[in-house]
């Protein structure tokens, strides 16, 4: 069989894996929203089935079409040497890239009302509606605005089957920034009816005849984590979707193209296109479940395709440079938690200049450190370590 024909077969195998991954999501009957627990559980089973067969083309290529002395499990990024370092370096790079939004996240927690972090079972204030800036651009990976964050939209993560739900936004993270600023402004001006406005000297505990100690930022965050532990959307976005997608779209696709002799840089650029295309089916769900106009749904999914492709480039780069599927997996989990940076809220924040400088510094650090921190020799990567 000629080299060109086997290369074509490798591309077809990648397409087949992507179609199987997405197609199995729709084998279930019913019309429940994608964020419904039943839908999530069914789709976890569907993606697990897709993962169980996705590695077979790599095995077939490595043992039949392009025999290689490299064990199949190492081709798939399953090795121990340098594993911990690969995960740590991947997370470090993500933190530098998101340092500005992370600082904003901390500021947002500090500005929130104390009762918003009440432990489970305690009364909480009525949640404020999201501002336009909170929702971020439509279809974003982790912001989910135009796609309907938390309502079954397509934008809350970089996953092909999870929704506009963002774990960080649900935890009261950056998405709470605009409301936090509004509440702070109301408190400072003594806005009538505002939960933190003062109408005398009573303070927060006036109704009880005294003042109560309020939890700090860490206490609020811990309370949110406890509330989120039982949220199926959280498990989907931070566990099921990253694990299954990195397995199918990175570990089971990139090796095929590498074994076909494609330059590694071209593999980095090509593989994420399958990943991005796997999100196009969200158009139908946006129109059907959220009654979104077709034009807006197309715009949301186009944005998501662009964002997920950008993320896919980084994830494939990490996979090939480290030789570990755990490296892009760690980045995927982090990015799903962080969500798309809320640049609108950051620009309107009182410390906008500091946030801008922090973001620029983090981006510069990321660019300067990317090559050094992912040097194949750091992880004993002899599988994909040459050809850069």
Image: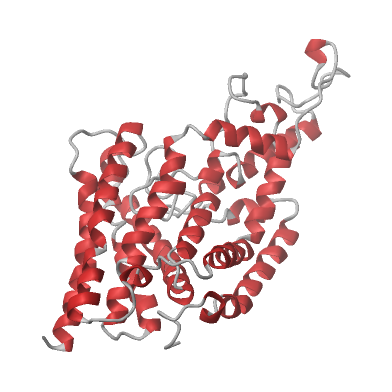
Examine the image and state in which quarter residue 373 appears.
bottom right
Residue at image coords 44%, 81%? 382
Is residue 11 shown above or below 91?
below
Q: Decide if residue 339 is in sight here.
A: yes
Examine the image and state in which quarter residue 186 appears.
top right
Instruction: Decide which of 15, 163 is in the foreground and name it.
Output: 15
Q: Position of residue 77 (x, y in %)?
A: 40, 68
Question: Position of 53 compared to 354: left or right?
Answer: left
Instruction: Decide which of 187, 268 is in the foreground and name it.
Output: 268
- The quarter of the image holding the N terminus is bottom left
Examine the image and state in which quarter residue 11 appears.
bottom left
Q: Position of residue 173 (x, y in %)?
A: 61, 44
Residue at image coords 59%, 54%? 344
- Residue furthest toward the right? 201
Q: Decide if residue 181 is in sight here.
A: no
Question: Position of 91 compared to 292: left or right?
Answer: right
Instruction: Decide which of 375, 79 is in the foreground and name it.
Output: 79
Is residue 331 shown above or below 282?
below
- The quarter of the image holding the C terminus is bottom left
Residue at image coords 30%, 69%? 253
């Amino acid at each position: 069989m000629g080299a060109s024909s086997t290369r074509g077969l490798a591309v077809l195998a990648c397409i087949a894996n992507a179609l199987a991954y997405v197609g199995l999501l729709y084998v279930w009957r019913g019309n429940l929203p994608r964020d419904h627990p039943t839908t999530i559980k069914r789709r976890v089973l569907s993606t697990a089935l897709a993962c169980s067969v996705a590695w077979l083309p790599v095995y077939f290529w490595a043992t039949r079409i392009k025999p290689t002395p490299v064990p199949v499990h190492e081709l798939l990024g399953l090795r121990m040497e340098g594993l911990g370092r690969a995960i740590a370096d991947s997370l470090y790079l993500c933190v530098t890239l998101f340092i500005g939004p992370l600082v904003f996240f901390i500021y947002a927690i500090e500005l929130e009302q104390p009762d918003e972090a009440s432990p489970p079972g305690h009364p909480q204030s009525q949640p404020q509606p999201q501002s336009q800036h909170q929702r971020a651009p439509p279809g974003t990976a982790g912001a989910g605005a135009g796609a309907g964050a938390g309502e079954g939209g397509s934008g809350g993560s970089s996953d092909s089957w999870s929704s506009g739900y963002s774990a960080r936004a649900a935890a009261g993270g950056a998405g709470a920034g605009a409301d936090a600023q509004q509440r702070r402004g109301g408190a400072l001006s003594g806005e009538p009816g505002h939960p933190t406005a003062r109408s005398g000297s009573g303070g927060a505990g006036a109704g009880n005849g005294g003042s109560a100690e309020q939890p700090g930022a860490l206490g609020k965050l811990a309370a949110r984590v406890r509330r989120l532990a039982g949220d199926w959307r959280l498990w989907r976005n931070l566990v099921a979707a990253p694990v299954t997608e990195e397995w199918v779209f990175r570990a089971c696709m990139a090796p095929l193209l590498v074994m076909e002799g494609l330059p590694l840089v071209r593999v980095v650029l090509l593989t994420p296109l399958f990943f991005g295309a796997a999100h196009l089916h969200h158009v139908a769900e946006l129109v059907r479940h959220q009654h979104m106009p077709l034009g807006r749904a197309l715009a949301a999914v186009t944005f998501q395709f662009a964002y997920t492709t950008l993320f896919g480039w980084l994830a494939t780069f990490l996979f090939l440079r480290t030789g570990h599927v755990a490296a892009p997996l760690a980045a995927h989990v982090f990015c799903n938690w962080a969500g798309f940076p809320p640049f609108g809220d950051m620009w309107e924040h009182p410390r906008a200049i500091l946030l801008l400088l922090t973001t620029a510094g983090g981006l510069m650090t990321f660019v300067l450190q990317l090559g050094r921190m992912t040097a194949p020799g750091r992880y004993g990567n002899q599988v994909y370590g040459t050809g850069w």
